[in-house]
Image: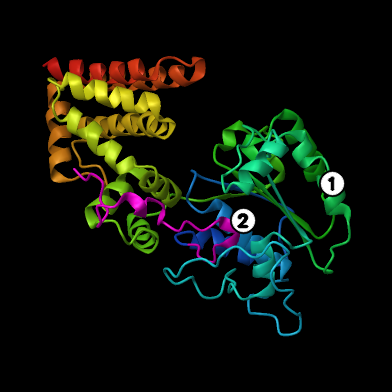
């Protein structure tokens, strides 16, 4: 079972994935079908005024949204403009260019980072682009965090104040005589008032304006919003694409660690990089080492793991996400007898087979249901995290003991 996985014993490589912000990312991998649909609409003169990009987190929705925005703002020109002068870096400087990686597809919506529109979008200085996302609840604290080099804490939702001037922005004549584009990341994070404000714009869209809405969980949106958008469903990335991207962003990882990440991330490169960055491989290895002992888990190590997730927010969130996912894959092994795709080495697969034989499928389904309920309840009402983790491990241990 892969654990850790860097080629160096130094943990300083943790932040070396060089994850590129979507607005600065020239690479879109594994979503050629969705990109081609946008291009066909543009070339056929049928570009919808609103697009809804759906799919799991971390598969490229935001990257595609900014790719669309750049293409539209450039009037469909994807080669560096010869007549429009480059305004150069913004007042605060451009973000760093993305690292070299797998070749971006030629043609399509692709645009070179040297294009002046790309540079302005990357710098957040294009007058005809508006990006709506969760704002900070305390602007002064947010500024202090930025000054200290920390990521500001954001609200849990997009509020009406974040979208109040959206209609006014779109009704203005485009500063560069072309289009105005709005990217909402993510629309399913809007509260009711914010959603109603966006709906008013969708009902009467100004000419030469395009809204690109992202939704990780589109079922959370009011039905009136998707009905006024052209939906573009993005799919999880296939293992070969994940492998290529991980080789680009995390060349320091061993091949076994990348394989584990591919299995855990379920087609989301964003999730894979997040797991690698936050110590997910180590935590997963520790959990699997305990599970391999079932039905006689080491009590002291269980308590040590409980202490770890109780004290570290990142470790708790990883535990909360990883364990139910593993139980779901265990259920698949028990139901179908096949091997989960990616991320499971011979030792771990043998453990899954042994546990699936130790208990009936409905027993493991019950463990999965109780685990999801317990971990969700712990977050909802702020229960003791250590006790929740111990209870989950006990559920697995007991299920393995019943033959």
Seen in the picture, residue 237 relative to 301 is either above or below; the reply is below
Q: Is residue 43 visible?
A: no
Q: Quadrant of the C terminus?
A: top left
Seen in the picture, residue 270 relative to 312 is either above or below; the reply is below
User: Which residues fall within the magenta stretch?
Assistant: 1-28
Bin the neighbour count of mark 1 within 10 Å (Cα to Cα): few under 14, some 14-19, many 20 and up. Answer: some
- The part of the image, by quadrant, that contains residue 308 is top left
Query: At which x and y percent is residue 12?
Result: 35, 52
For disc 1, the marked residue is 167
Query: At which x and y percent is residue 284?
Result: 28, 37
Q: Are marks 2 and 1 in contact (CB under 8 Å)?
A: no
Residue in the foreground of this view, choosing between 29 and 141? 141
For disc 2, the marked residue is 65
N-term-proximal mark, 2 vs 1: 2
Query: At which x and y percent is residue 59?
Result: 47, 51
Q: In the image, is 60 to the left or to the right of 254?
A: right
Please tell me whether mark 2 sits on a helix, a strand or a loop. helix
Bin the neighbour count of mark 2 within 10 Å (Cα to Cα): few under 14, some 14-19, many 20 and up. Answer: many
Seen in the picture, residue 125 relative to 346 is either above or below; the reply is below
Q: Is residue 11 visible?
A: yes
Predominant secondary structure, magenta span: loop
Q: Residue at x 57, y 70 (%)?
A: 110
Residue in the foreground of this view, choosing between 272 and 333? 272
Residue 81 belongs to magenta span? no
Residue 13 belongs to magenta span? yes
Q: Residue at x 61, y 41 (%)?
A: 152
């Amino acid at each position: 079972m892969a654990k850790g996985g860097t080629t160096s014993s130094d943990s300083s490589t943790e932040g070396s994935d060089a994850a590129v912000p979507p607005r600065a990312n020239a690479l879109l991998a594994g979503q050629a079908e969705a990109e081609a649909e946008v291009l066909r609409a543009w070339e056929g003169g049928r570009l919808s005024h609103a697009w809804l990009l759906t799919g799991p987190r971390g598969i490229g929705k935001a990257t595609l949204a900014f790719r669309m925005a750049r293409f539209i703002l450039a009037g469909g020109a994807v080669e560096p403009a010869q007549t429009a002068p480059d305004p150069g870096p913004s007042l605060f400087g451009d973000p760093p260019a993305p690292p070299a990686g797998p070749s971006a597809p030629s043609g399509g919506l692709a645009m070179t980072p040297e294009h002046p529109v790309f540079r302005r979008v990357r710098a957040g200085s294009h007058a005809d682009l508006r990006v709506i996302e969760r704002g900070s609840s305390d602007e002064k604290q947010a500024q202090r965090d930025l000054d200290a080099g920390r990521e500001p804490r954001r609200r849990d939702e997009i509020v009406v104040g974040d979208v109040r001037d959206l209609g006014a922005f779109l009704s203005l004549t485009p500063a560069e005589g072309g289009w105005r584009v709005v990217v909402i990341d993510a629309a399913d994070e809007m509260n009711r008032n914010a959603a109603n404000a966006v709906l008013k714009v969708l009902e009467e869209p100004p000419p030469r304006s395009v809204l690109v809405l992202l939704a990780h969980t589109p079922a959370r949106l009011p039905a009136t919003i998707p009905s006024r958008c052209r939906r573009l469903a993005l799919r999880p990335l296939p293992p070969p694409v994940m492998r290529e991207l991980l080789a680009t962003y995390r060349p320091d990882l061993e091949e076994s660690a990348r394989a584990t990440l591919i299995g855990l991330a379920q087609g989301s490169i964003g999730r894979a990089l997040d797991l690698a960055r936050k110590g997910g491989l180590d935590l997963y290895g520790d959990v699997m080492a305990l599970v391999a002992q079932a039905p006689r888990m080491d009590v002291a190590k269980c308590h040590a793991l409980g202490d770890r997730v109780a004290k570290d927010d990142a470790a708790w969130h990883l535990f909360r996400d990883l364990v139910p996912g593993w139980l779901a894959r265990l259920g698949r092994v028990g139901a179908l007898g096949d091997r989960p795709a990616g991320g499971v080495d011979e030792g771990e697969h043998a453990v899954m087979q042994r546990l699936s034989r130790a208990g009936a499928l409905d027993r493991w389904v019950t463990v999965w249901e109780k685990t999801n309920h317990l971990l969700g309840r712990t977050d909802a009402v702020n229960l003791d995290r250590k006790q929740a983790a111990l209870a989950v491990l006990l559920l697995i241990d007991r299920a393995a003991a019943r033959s």
